[in-house]
Structure formats: C-alpha cells, structure tokens
Amino acid sequence: MSLLHAIVCLAVGFLTCWGLIPLIRRVAARRGGARGSEFHHTHKTPVPRLGGVALAAGFIAVAFLE
C-alpha cells in the first residue's frame, strides 16, 4: 500500500462520514431515532443515536476502494 493509496482511503472514509452525518441527524429527528434525557441525564435536548451508521458507511466505502 502506497502513501497515496492510504491518503485516498482516509479522505474517502472521512468525507463519507462527514457527508452522511447531517442526513442521519435529519432522519433520526423525523423518525424518533433520538433519545432524550431519560437515557443520560446530561442532555437537555434529544441526541441522535444513529452515528454508527455513518461510521459503518465510511468503512464500507473504503472497503470498496480496495
């Protein structure tokens, strides 16, 4: 694996995650995929719990590159 290949994989994974997070936040807000303050008593507003989807999509995107 060359340095260029590693940088491209890093960029694709980062951009995939970064690009999907706003979409996932909107979907979670509409469909009730957020938990309120009953889960952790530190949050005042509901927090989306679907961030793992963006991370998994980043790994999948990088896997398709190889």
Image (cartoon, grey):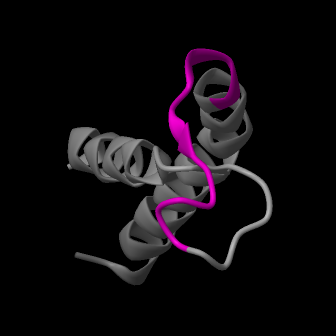
Which region is colored magenta?
29-40
The residue lying toward the viewer, choosing from 22 and 63, is 22
Q: Residue at left 67%, top 37%?
A: 25
Q: Quadrant of the N terminus?
A: bottom left
Q: Residue at left 67%, top 17%?
A: 30
The residue lying toward the viewer, choosing from 4 and 55, is 55
Rendering coords of residue 60 (x, y %): 27, 42
Relative to residue 24, is residue 31 depicted above or below?
A: above
Q: Quadrant of residue 22?
A: top right
Judged from this view, the residue extending furthest toward the right is 44
Does 53 lie within the magenta span?
Answer: no
Is residue 8 shown left or right of residue 63? right
The residue lying toward the viewer, choosing from 50 and 14, is 50
The residue lying toward the viewer, choosing from 3 and 16, is 16
Q: Residue at left 56%, top 25%?
A: 32
Rendering coords of residue 55 (x, y %): 40, 54
Q: Quadrant of residue 65?
A: top left
Rendering coords of residue 44 (x, y %): 79, 64
Q: Residue at left 39%, top 42%?
A: 53
Judged from this view, the residue extending furthest toward the top is 31
Relative to residue 7, is residue 44 depicted above or below?
A: above
